[in-house]
């Protein structure tokens, strides 16, 4: 099949379409700490959204665990609670579980600080 015979994205079946994200991800190479069962793991935020974050490095012991993300760069003190949903070769992926107030604080921080740089 030549490249001109390849189906375009518009003609793919819904289950074949690339996954659309609910929230914009912001690249944010920020120093952070991931608390796993109260133990701190030093990491860097690779990217972040209101839904979750990608962290460097991979932390296999965290897979499936409830965690809290902290960063000295956040201008709010509330930790970002969530769950580690994937660990790739060099990345730990979190899905946040934020209440409305914390989601609002994170949205304002991302729009004014990370996006504003």
Image (spheres, rainbow, N blue to C red):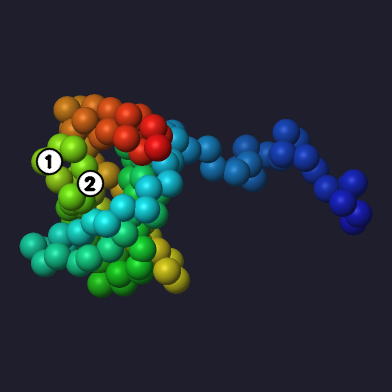
- Of callouts 1 and 2, which one flags the residue occurring earlier in the amino acid sequence? 2
- Tell me the crowding category of disc 2: few under 14, some 14 to 19, or many 20 or more residues within 10 angstroms, Cα based: few
- Residue 27 position in % (x across, y down): 43, 46
- Residue 84 position in % (x across, y down): 29, 57
> Which quarter of the figure has residue 34?
bottom left
Q: Identify the residue shown where x is 47% and y is 38%.
A: 21
The residue that label 1 is drawn on is 78
Q: Quadrant of the N terminus?
A: bottom right
Looking at this rendering, what residue extends furthest in the front direction?
Answer: 117
Q: Quadrant of the C terminus?
A: top left
The residue that label 2 is drawn on is 73
Secondary structure category for the residue under label 1 = loop
Q: Is residue 86 above or below residue 9?
A: below
- Horizontal arrangement in the rendering, residue 6 relative to residue 56 (left or right): right
Q: Identify the residue shown where x is 35% and y is 67%.
A: 57
Q: Is residue 20 visible?
A: yes
Residue 111 tag number: none
Q: How far apart are the two marked residues, 1 and 2, measured between alpha carbons?
A: 12 Å
Nearest to viewer (mark 1 / mark 2): 2
- Residue 67 position in % (x across, y down): 19, 56
Q: Identify the residue shown where x is 30% and y is 69%.
A: 59
> Which quarter of the figure has residue 23?
top left
Looking at this rendering, what residue extends furthest in the left direction?
Answer: 38
Secondary structure category for the residue under label 2 = loop
Q: Is residue 84 visible?
A: no
- Residue 87 position in % (x across, y down): 38, 65
- Tell me the crowding category of disc 1: few under 14, some 14 to 19, or many 20 or more residues within 10 angstroms, Cα based: some
- Horizontal arrangement in the rendering, residue 7 relative to residue 88 (left or right): right
């Amino acid at each position: 099949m030549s490249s001109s015979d390849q189906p375009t994205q518009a003609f793919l079946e819904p289950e074949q379409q690339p996954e659309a994200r609910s929230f914009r991800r912001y690249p944010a190479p920020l120093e952070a700490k991931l608390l796993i069962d109260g133990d701190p793991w030093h990491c860097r935020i690779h990217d972040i959204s209101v839904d979750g974050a990608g962290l460097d490095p991979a932390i296999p012991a965290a897979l499936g665990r409830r965690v809290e993300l902290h960063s000295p760069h956040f201008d709010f003190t509330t930790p970002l609670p969530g769950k580690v949903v994937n660990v790739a070769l060099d990345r730990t992926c979190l899905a946040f579980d934020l209440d409305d107030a914390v989601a609002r604080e994170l949205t304002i921080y991302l729009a004014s600080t990370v996006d504003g740089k």
